[in-house]
Amino acid sequence: MAASTPFAAGRDADVYGLGADRVLRRYRDGTDVTVEAGFMTHLHAAGFPVPQVHHAAGADLVMRRVPGPTMLQALVARTIEIGPAARILAGLHRRLHAVAPLPGAVGGERILHLDRWPPRPVSCCAATYPRPVTR
């Protein structure tokens, strides 16, 4: 069961802890997470660093908890410098563009992430995750 108080919040959703290894992200406006969960599942299966989706229904998305600082936090703490951070972001974009289209994509449409900037990625376990969820 999710905690009654979110431990993090974004523009559109609140994040609740579900134990040590999972979180629940719930969209405040009731946005259906089915399409997003499909993208994340496809990306995870392709080896792209996104949290594994465990369950998706209605406005609720249960996924692996990704611990660690955001890239912005790491930059401010000076645990990463701007050059390596920029290379990480560029590398994530290259890797994303190399992922095969979703089955049924029209004309080879690719996945495009338009919200990739330092407050988003989370560093964990020597991997950098495009941050759909907070730490």
Image: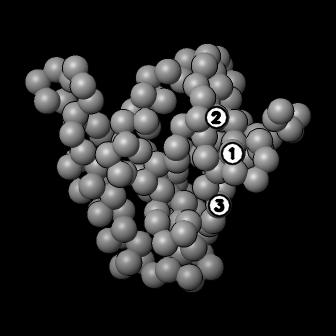
Please determine whether, in this image, residue 7 is positioned above or below residue 106.
below
Q: Secondary structure at mark 1?
A: strand
Residue flagged by tag 2: what amino acid is it?
Answer: Val
CB within 8 Å, label 2 to label 1: yes
From mark 3 to mark 1, how far is it between C-alphas?
A: 10 Å
User: From the viewer's perspective, is 75 left or right of 108?
Assistant: right
From mark 2 to mark 1, how far is it between C-alphas?
A: 7 Å
| Residue tagged 1 | 22
Q: Can you give x and y, in whole percent of width and height, for residue 101 in the image?
A: 22, 34
Q: Earlier in the sequence, mark 3 or mark 1?
A: 1
Residue 58 appears in the rendering: yes
Q: Earlier in the sequence, mark 2 or mark 3?
A: 2
Q: Nearer the viewer, residue 134 or 21?
A: 21
Residue flagged by tag 1: what amino acid is it?
Answer: Arg
Query: Residue at position x 28%, y 37% from top?
Result: 111
Quarter where residue 72 is shown: bottom right
Quarter where residue 49 is shown: bottom left
Please determine whether, in this image, residue 55 is positioned above or below residue 44.
above
| Residue tagged 2 | 62
Q: Secondary structure at mark 2?
A: strand
Q: Quadrant of the C terminus?
A: bottom right
Residue flagged by tag 3: what amino acid is it?
Answer: Pro
Please determine whether, in this image, residue 99 is positioned above or below residue 103.
below
From mark 2 to mark 3, how far is it between C-alphas?
A: 15 Å
Query: Residue at position x 54%, y 60% from top?
Result: 122
| Residue tagged 3 | 67
